Image (spheres, coloured by chain):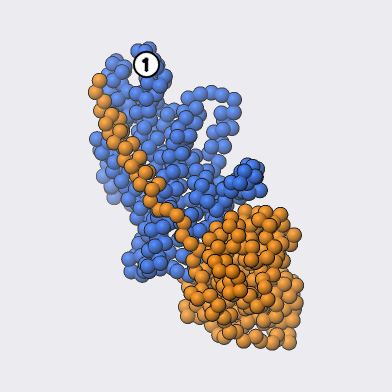
Chain colours: A blue, B orange
Amino acid sequence: MSISAYDAGQARAEFSTPIDAAQPHGIADWRVRVDPTGGDRTPQAGKRPRLQWSDLVLWLLPLPLVLLLVLPLVALGWRALTDGALTGEGSAALREAMALTLKTSLLSTALIVVTGLPLAYLLARREFTGRRALDVVVDLPIVLPPSVAGIALLLAFGRNGVIGRWFAEAGLTIGFTTAAVVLAQCFVSAPFFVRASAASLQRVQQDLEDVAADLGASPWARFRTVTLPIALPGILAGVVLAWARAVGEFGATIMFAGNFPGVTRTMPLAIYSAYGGGDIATAVILAAALLAAAGLTLGGVRWAAGREQR
Amino acid sequence: MTRRGPFNGKRSGTLVLIALVVLAIALLSGGAGAESTGWPEACGNASPESATPRAHEAAAVPFPTEGGDLTVFAASSLTDAFEEIGDAIEADNPEVSVTFNFAGSQTLVTQLAEGATADVLATADAASMAMAADAQVVTGEPQVFAGNVVVLVVPATNPADITRVADLSRPGVKLVLAGPSVPAGRYAREAMCVVSMTAPLGWLEGLKGNVVSEEEDVRDVLAKVQLGEADAGLVYATDAQSAGDAVIAISLPDGAGPMVHYPIAAATDGDVALAAAFIRYVRSDEGAAILRAHGFLAP
């Protein structure tokens, strides 16, 4: 058991009363400290030294990076406020694309959680032949360019695809339907959820579950009352990541699902269509709307996580 | 036992509840897909833009001896022909290097207007070129250098058994068009409007209902048909030719297809000498022969 000095005392105290050990802050803090998605919820947050003059050199190198990250977004916001014009047609397109994006991304996320959580548990907690291979396969879409995802999906689920052919024979085509959008979103965003959840589940200490088992908790009860609550912040972070990736899915959708208003034209495709159609003003507004939604979501999640932590 | 840890007890229940409500709202919102848009207001008054056909130049002007890098923004239907023209120019002028950016004409104009730099712009219609002129990204009088026609393409396997344009309104046909702001999409809509005037009542409505995707670029329409994902698409005759045996091309009824004209102009910020030499080459006999070989018509 490796718990660093700062909360070792706390942890020891908790382990002397094993059942409670699952809940209070010692364990949660320890987990969050190593949680790469934990951000500013680290326990050191309160003890961080203030900026110092000697930090100046630390600022010089990342400055271009910070500018690179911030400037385009500022430019987008500025252009939207000053030059972005939304015609009646544009606002209809915005509503339609927003509704479709929300619908498809939430559906994809729900599907991913239902199917991905058991997978994450298996990957984190079981040893089986092919586990490593499965681990790699699950991670692959993260590093694949969207165009590869698009082609691969076409070859699998397209009308002449390996599986799509059977569907077509049964009179079902996936291409050009909202279902294709959901498939594409699931393909590209599932890894983010499975990865985050598996990592989170893996960090739940086996001892705690063993103790619960000794006390007579059934496997399901152990998972529900011990494992899941401890792993939940990481799992929720995975949900948000996967959802955000689904909202942003573009390449695989446009190649595999097509581009039609209300059916397959999600926000990213609507932005591309407005841009390609020479309607920069609308493209800017749509992009700014998506940026605002993303910012509010991330900010909201951070805020909620911070509140829960306190 | 009391639970004080993160995300458990009542709070997690509330979170799940909120998530479910949001999901339900999302699933219920939105609704049926919109109709294919961008069709001419009243079908039939769609007249092809006037463009002055010009005679080919007798001979190509030489490229500047010091050479240089030439960047050409061209409509995606020009892809194969222009790449061959580029190779020919590079073979004759080793010091010149030609780079192409192929995309939908509208996209090219947008890119130039947003600050992309090029030496030459070639679009698939006069309207896009006029927008480029309005945005002051091209200079001088655009020259029409080639023509084209719209054809119907179906996959070689012809899954929907389409043999003529009239079949396009049959229920269940998956038709792919270029978007309404893409020249190929505009031409296709004009052509279908003309066809509809001699078609049974409701034919055009049936066809509009069959449009499953509006692509940003005519080559994307071709790709969807080539892959067999779509049952039919409307592209240029030259695109159909470039796909070879993968697609079957079906001509539109006489008089239905608008004449497609390709204007070319020098970009405002480009290298004037290189741009002029490229434009001359495209309009020369050598250039015309390459264009002709790829199925383009004389302007």
Q: Nearer the viewer, residue B185 or A246?
A: B185
x, y percent for residue A78: 34, 65
| Residue depicted at x 40% and y 35% | A235
Return the chain for callout 1: A
Q: Residue at x 53, y 37 (%)?
A: A138
Pick the front one: B193 or A183:
B193
Horizontal side of A29 relative to B151 (left or right) equals: left
- Under mark 1, the amino acid is Ala
Quarter in which the N terminus of chain B is drawn:
top left
User: Which residue lies under the disc numbered 1?
Assistant: A217
Residue found at the very far front of the displayed protein: B201
Q: Position of residue B130 (x, y in %)?
A: 52, 80
Mark 1: secondary structure: loop
Q: Is residue B284 left or right of residue B274?
A: right
Residue A243 in which image quadrant: top left
Q: Confirm whether residue B268 shows in the render.
A: no
